[in-house]
Structures are given as C-alpha cells and as structure tokens.
Image: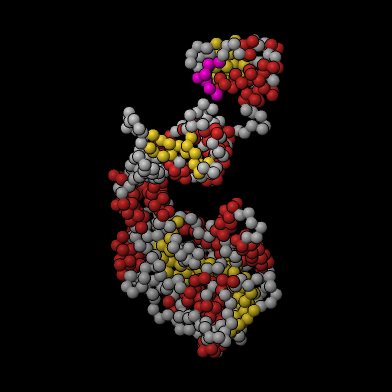
Amino acid sequence: MSAENMSLFGSSNGTVSYADENKLPDKHAPQFVATIATATAFPDVPVEKDCPAAEAGLCIVENGPKTAVTISTPLPAENVDQATGDSDDSPNLSAEKRVRSQAAKLQRDYQQHPLLPPCCDSCKHKCNSKPVNRSLIHQKFWGMEYNERKTWVAAHVKLMNVKRRRSESDTRCCTLPAQDVGEAVVCKKFFLNTLGLTCDKIITTAVSTLCGNVTVMADKRGKHEPANKFSEYVVAQIKNHIESYHPSVSHYRREHAPYRRYLSPEISIQDMHQNYVTSFPQHNCSYEFYRQIVKSLNISFVKLGEEECEYCLQHDVHKKECSAEECDLCRSWDMHVESARISRKHYKSDMEKNADDEVFLSCDMQKIIMLPRMPGIKSCVFTRRLVAFHETFAPLGGKKKQPLGVVWHEGISGRNADDVMSCFAKVLRHPSYRDTQKFTFYADNCGPQNKNWTLYTGLVGEVNRPGGPEKITIKYLEKGYTFMSADSFHSRIESELRKMKNVYDFEDFVAVINRHGIAVPMNAADFSFWANGASSAKFTRKPTLADVSIVQFRRGCTKLFWKTNMDSDDWEEGDFLKKKTASQLLRGDLFPSHCTPRGIPQSKKHDIETKLCALMSVGRRVFWGSLSVNDNSDDLIDS
C-alpha cells in the first residue's frame, strides 16, 4: 500500500506531521513505526512527545483523548509494511474465514490464550518451586471443549471455609496436577497464567457457591427458548394449511424418494405463505418460518428430472474428510461414475444408428399432473383434483418418428407395475411401429415402473404373441445420469401447459400432447391383469435386479437374458418363470383385460363438480359428469 498522505488515526482531534524525511535515522525507524502502530491500535493511549519520532522532526499535537497520526512523506517500504501489516508474510485478518469446525475452534482458542509467565518469586505459595509441567497442562486444557474446560476448572478449585469470616464468600483453593505429589496448591495468578487466562470469570462460572459442593453448570448459550416462539397450536395450524394444498407422492421418484411429496407446479411457496398471512394475520408468520415448516414436512418444489446426482453430492462431502488410501465408499463411487460413462456411451451410440427394422426409444413417466389445472384460482388449489398419468416413449435424438405419449387418469386405471406394462404393450402394437421387429428401450432404474418381474413377465408374452416383435431390449441408465429424450419431451409439454394456462379436462391435456407428439389415450380395455410370473423354485436362475444394466427377451423363448455391464460381450441367461406361466405365454395366451374403469371416490367427484365446474363452460363439464365412481378406490393423491 502507498504511504503517501497516509493517515493512521483514532480521531481527528490531534495530528502528527513529519517535517523532514531525511531527519529520521535508521536506528529510530523501528521505534517510530511502533509509535504509529500504537497510536493506530490503541487510540486511547497518548503518544509520548519525547519519543524518537519527535527527535526526528515530527510534530505531535494532542487536542483530546485520542491521537491522530498523519504522515505526509512516504516511509521506507519495509517500515511501512511493518506499520500497516501489508507484508507478504503477515496474514490479512479481515479476509480470514469464519471458524466453523470444532478442531479449528480449538486451535483458535489455543492461539488466543498463550501460556503466560508464572507468578513472582515472592509468592507465599512458592508456586515456582513446585513440580508443575505448565506447558503440558496448558496444551491439554485448550485441547478440551468448552464444557470440559469448565469441568476441569471446577475439579481443580476447592471451596473452603474461612477461619475468620468477614463476608459471605468462601475461600477458593486452586490446585494443579504435579509430578509425584498428585496436586499442588498454587495461587490464583499462577493458576490462571498457566491456563493462559487473564480473568477469573471461568472460575466464578465453573463452581457453585456452596461450600464443599463443586458443580458445573451446563453451557446454555443458544439453548434458551425464544420469547417469540410459536406455540404447538400455531405450528399445527401452519401444517394443516400446507396439507390443504394436497401434496402427493410422485410416481416419477417413488423408489428413490418414497417419503417425499410434491406440489403442483402451478403454485409457489410465496403464494402459499401469502394465503396463510391473509387467512391468519394475528400470527405474524414470516416467510422463512413458513418455508422451514414446508421443508420439515418433506415437501418439495423442485422440478423433477433436473436434480443432481445425490450419490455424487454425498461423495463430494465425503472426499473432503477422507484421507484413506483404500476407501470402500470412494471405490464404490468410482464404479458408479464408470457405469454412468458406459451407459451414456451406449445411449449416444444407439442415437446415431439407423435401421428400418429396429427402433430405439426412451421411456419415462412425467411428474404429477392434476386436472383441472387453473392457475390463479384459489379454490382449484385447495380441491382434491383428478390425477393424470403420462408415460412417454420418445425416439432417441428426436429424429424420424414423433414421440408417443400414452395417457390415462386415475378414473380409468392406476399406476402399478401391470399398468406400466400395459403402456409398453400399447406402444409395441401401435401402428407407428407395426413393421418394427426389434425394440430397444432406455429407462431409469425405478423398480416399480421399469425394473420388476411383472414387466418382464409381460414382455415375454409380447415377444411370443402372434405378430409380436422378434426382440425386446431394455437398457438402464445409471442413477443420477438418466436424462434422455423423454425428459426433453416432458419439458416441452410442461412449457405448453403454462402457455395454455387453463387445462379444464382430460381432452385439453390430450390436445397439449398432440401439439408436440402423438397422444395415445388408454381406455379400460387397454389395461390387462399382467401378473408377476417369476418362480421361486430351485430350477430357476434369476439375477439380482439392482445389479442388472441390460435385459433382453427373444421370440420363441421364455428365458431372461441379462448383463451387469453394458460393455460385456457375453449374455447371462436363465429361466425365471413358473412352468405353467411360461407354457401359457409360449403358446401366445395373454392375460385378460379390464372390463370396467377403476373409478374415483364419490366425494372427490362431488368436490370437483361443485367447486370447479361452475368456473368452466358447459361443454367442459361433460367429462367430469361422465367420470366413473367407485368408493372402494383409493385417492391416488395420497398413495
């Protein structure tokens, strides 16, 4: 830093002016710099007029309790660095980060409380002659946590009755560990200086005033209950208000986040908080407190499909603390990253393939969709609406054919494994792929949807039915790296829904999908009672589904073919079906279809008709009036 016209001051009441730079001898430079540093760090301490700085031509003026120092002519560079602390070796205290870890706090405390000199030789306790290892005691003391230090002090300070009482206080006897004699009685100054302390407050707070009963009070800092803390009644009321928005479990992340619930993207947490403040102004609930309650309920507003890899985020935290050469967690993460690299390599390779008899599709279910969708209508948000489902089958790279969007709602069927298998069957039989003999699907590792024995049983039936494909392959992308063409299609659909704003019924939702792809509405007869045909008999040979990266089904065979590494050239195979089921599927006999729609509870239909249909045109109410009712069906918002 430049020393030209540099001012080091405590206040503007006094000034020191340097008259002649040539009058400052080298022998006085350190003392002069020390004088400036003293005036800067301790502005209340007056500067001595007969110091070497004055002899060198400095004029010192004091007009108040504080002294200002002004230097009009630059000092030598080395002296300026010593005075201002701008040398390369001196730390910049203003730029230091806040200490957060426990180890760093202990190190900070140790440095801030160095070992002080012992008491004088005239001490009546003769402390200096006692075998006390002061440096070792000091080091161990500052290696303890706060409460441990208080306990240590309390254990080495004894309360004793005085012989001639002149006040209500008791005599405190300080002791320190000593070699050979156990504990040595020392004076208070020797005791405190050994611990690096300049105040006896720690003794006062560490011991009680009861004679002979030394106790330690726990540290209560940060543990006092705030005066403005909300009662349990108010917190319960806030939770009930949040639940009134009907957060639901996402079928998109059901396996990896079974306890996390999601809210419709048409609302925000700001809207929810504003509604609560309007409804209950007497509670004065802040936005931050409301947000924390939402978080504690495990309710998310994150856009699904855009999350980072949780495994990689956990490893980023772990690697900062891991110093072992051989670590199981680090080795597992290396395998995870390598598997992700291999699966993405195959995805890109298949994207560039061009064959007339083979198609490569990515399949995924879109996040929660609730109908009707009417942003800005408060009664719509608080009503238990109809859950709609959208299973997408999109070509890799978005070339040639348009994506197929298989759609249905909870009034027709649910979202179990047999329902997802029915979607696969619908696509395999779709006119767009009637000449296709080989299907390759890319999917995520969601077990209830894409990796289960019900799905595998159904695909064996599809390759063996008359007119079925020759081969069906499913490749599973590594967790955390599952972005694919289906996600891009979902993004376009979500964007179109926002542009359309109001989606009154299921036909409107189908129209949105048709603008970017081909909507394939499902009716009750399109869903079959696909069953889990896997056998537990000893003759079967099945893989552990969690380890599988690719599976394949071939015509004329009921075996399962699989790999645990996509780069492997060899397929493993095994019979996994019950013999009766395998014989049935090999003959081309499929499972029966549903006869009637699933239906929704009468109360749910009544709420939609009474609260929301009045806000629609008459033509849009027809769909809601024709919904099937079944009080035995669960509301899929809650399941």
Viewed as shown, does residue 524 lie left or right of 232? right
Q: Nearer the viewer, residue 638 or 104?
A: 104
The residue under the point 59% across, 16% down is 70
- The percent position of residue 328, horizontal first and vertical second, equals 61, 62
Tell me which residue sits at (66%, 70%) in the image: 566
Instruction: Please check the rendered image and state whether residue 405 is part of the magenta-colored stretch, yes or no.
Output: no
Percent x, y for residue 94? 57, 33
On screen, residue 171 above or below 600 = above
Relative placement, left or right, of 562 versus 13 is right
432 above or below 250? below
Q: Give the colouring mode of the picture.
A: secondary structure
| Placement of the N terminus among the 4 image quadrants | top right
Closer-to-camera residue (158/35): 158
In the figure, 211 relative to 497: above or below? Answer: above
The main secondary structure of the magenta stretch is loop
All told, the count of numbered labels is 0
- For image coordinates 57% across by 64% down, the residue present is 479
Q: Nearer the viewer, residue 288 or 40?
A: 40
Query: In this orientation, does residue 71 appear?
Result: yes
Q: Quadrant of the C terminus?
A: bottom left
Range of residues picked out in magenta: 41-47
Q: Is residue 252 visible?
A: no
